[in-house]
Every structure is written in structure tokens, then in C-alpha cells.
Amino acid sequence: MQELSVRHLLGIKDITAEDLQLIFETADNFKDVLNRPIKKVPSLRDITIANVFFENSTRTRLSFELAEKRLSADVINFSSSGSSVKKGETLLDTVNNILAMKVDMIVMRHSSPGAPHFLSRHIDANIVNAGDGTHEHPTQALLDSFSIREKLGEVAGKKVVIVGDILHSRVALSNIFALQKLGAEVMVCGPVTLLPKYIKELGVKVELDVRKALAWCDVANVLRIQLERQQMKYFPSLREYTLYYGIDKKMLDSLDKEIVLMHPGPINRGVELSSDAADSHHSIILNQVENGVAIRMAVLYLLASKK
Ligand code: CP
């Protein structure tokens, strides 16, 4: 049996192109399972997984929980709100107490970049990073590339633009790593204040004009403006952002080719995307969510064999 090169999924930066292909092929099989009347397999029976969320989530948390249940794992859910973190318990004490209950794997979202990497140096259980601050969100990038592969046949050679708040986005960094490892050309587009200074060192194209970016690409992955992470004003107003960087259906329809529209969610409707664009035939946003379950099943299944 083929194996992953890692025993934790901390980021896409740490995994190989072969790992990506193995995850996709495993997810293909699990997607078939999810389309059957009986959607459950016994692959992770007797494995216990804790979903440890120190930050809000809808898609990632529910998708991991469903993936775990479809694999017949035992699941416990921890949310920092309402927990003893509020009494001052540390991250390591919290996780070590969860592990003392005979837990095998930790899926963790945390607002601090590097929190899962820190944990991996102190605990034995497999760890999956479900988003660490502005750093990485590896399973989001996996499901995004998997969805491009499903829609366009392959990722290699495709032109993908990531539009919006690149500076505060963990989705952008993980997507850049995944897309490049899979052989896509990557562009980022947004106001210069929302592009990190080091961005060109990652080997991506940079475009400030969203209309030119849309004309160039096969796929546009549009990011949420992350107002909760912005410590200062990066643009004059949301209205002005929408005027210059908002994407609507008219813009997509006016292109001389079909492009695929993606968004990791949650969408700020009427800000980075109009409702008529988000809900149009260009959009594969809900396919991304659907694919997230198969991708997370594949990641958990493959990591469970890496003790
Ligand atoms: N895409 C994503 O991570 O969404 P949630 O924050 O709802 O999990």
C-alpha cells in the first residue's frame, strides 16, 4: 500500500506532489462511497478523533466530523468557547488532557500560526491542521485542487488566480503551494495593501486589475475580505473594495471563455462576490464543500496508518 510521506498534515508546504496524488486517488474512492445509499465504511473503527477548535468554523468542523463518522471513527468535539481555556488552561495542557482519554488523532484549528507545528513536537498523536491563523489551511487547498481536477480534468497547466485578501489568508498560501506542486500557473490579484511583500518570492504572477486577471485565468478562487483579522484600514471602504475588486455575473459572462468560479466560504455576499455570480453556472462553490468530506476522509484514513 502507498503511504504519505508525513505522519501529520501540518501544511501543504511539507508534503510532496506524490502525497497530493495519493490523497486525490484515495478521495476518488471515498467520493464513490459517499454517492452510495450506505455512505459508511469501517476503515477507522476503533480510532478516536478529537476535533479541537479554538476558532469559529462551519464548513471545516462539520466536514471533518462527517468524514470521521463516515469512516466509523469515534468522535469528540472540543470548542474553546465554554471550555476551561477560559479559566487559563494552556493549549498543551488542554490537548494532553484530551489525549489522556485515549484519543488517537487531533484535528485542530487555532488562531496562532504554527500552533499545530508546536503541538507536533510535544505529543504522539497524529495532527491535522484545520487552519492556523494566517498561515496554512491544508485540507481547504486539497479540496480546492481536487475540485479543479474534477471540473477541468487536471490541474497541471491550468491558470488559477486567487483574488482578494491574500495578506490575511491561510487559504491563499496553502493553495499556492498545492497548485504549484500540481503544475498549475498561479496569479494573485488584489489591492497592493492586501498583498504580502514577499509574494513574488513564491513564484506567482501579481496583477492589480481584476478584469485583466479574469481574462487571463481558467479558474478564479475568490477570497473573503477578513475584516476580523485586519488591524488597520487596508482600503478606504468596503464599497470601494467592491467597486474595484468585487466580481459579478456580468463580468464573468462578458469574458470570451468560460472560467470556473470558486470561494472557500464563508462568502461576504455583495462584497467580494455578488449573489448572481456566487449562484451562477460558473460557480463550483458547493461542489468544493461536497468534496471536502471525501478529501478529509482520505487524509484521516491515510494518516491513521502512519503511527
Ligand atoms: N472554508 C472554511 O475554512 O470555512 P469555515 O471557517 O466555516 O470552516
Image (cartoon, rainbow, N blue to C red):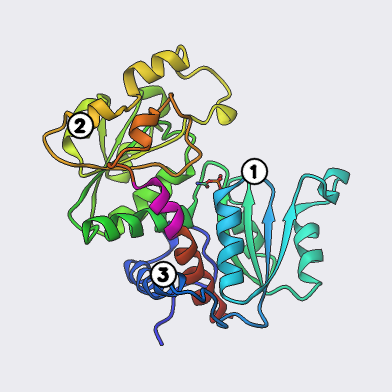
Q: Residues within 10 Å of mark 3 (few under 14, many from 20)?
A: many
Tell me, yes or no, whether the highlighted magenta stretch contains residue 290: yes
Q: Upstream in the sequence, badge 2 or badge 3?
A: 3
Q: Does the closest atom of ligand 1 sit within 8 Å of the Cβ of label 2?
A: no
Number of marks in picture? 3
Measure how far apart labels 1 and 2 are at the Cα level: 35 Å
Amino acid marked by disc 1: Asn
Residue hosting label 2: 253
Residue 4, given in percent of the width and then of the height, sits at 44, 75
The residue lying furthest to the front in this view is 37
Residue hosting label 3: 31
Q: Upstream in the sequence, badge 1 or badge 3?
A: 3
The residue lying furthest to the bottom in this view is 1
Q: In the image, is 42 to the left or to the right of 205?
A: right
Q: Does the closest atom of ligand 1 sit within 8 Å of the Cβ of label 1?
A: yes
> The N terminus is located in which quarter?
bottom left
Residue 85, given in percent of the width and then of the height, sits at 81, 48
Measure how far apart labels 1 and 3 are at the Cα level: 27 Å
Residue at image position (85%, 50%) is 84
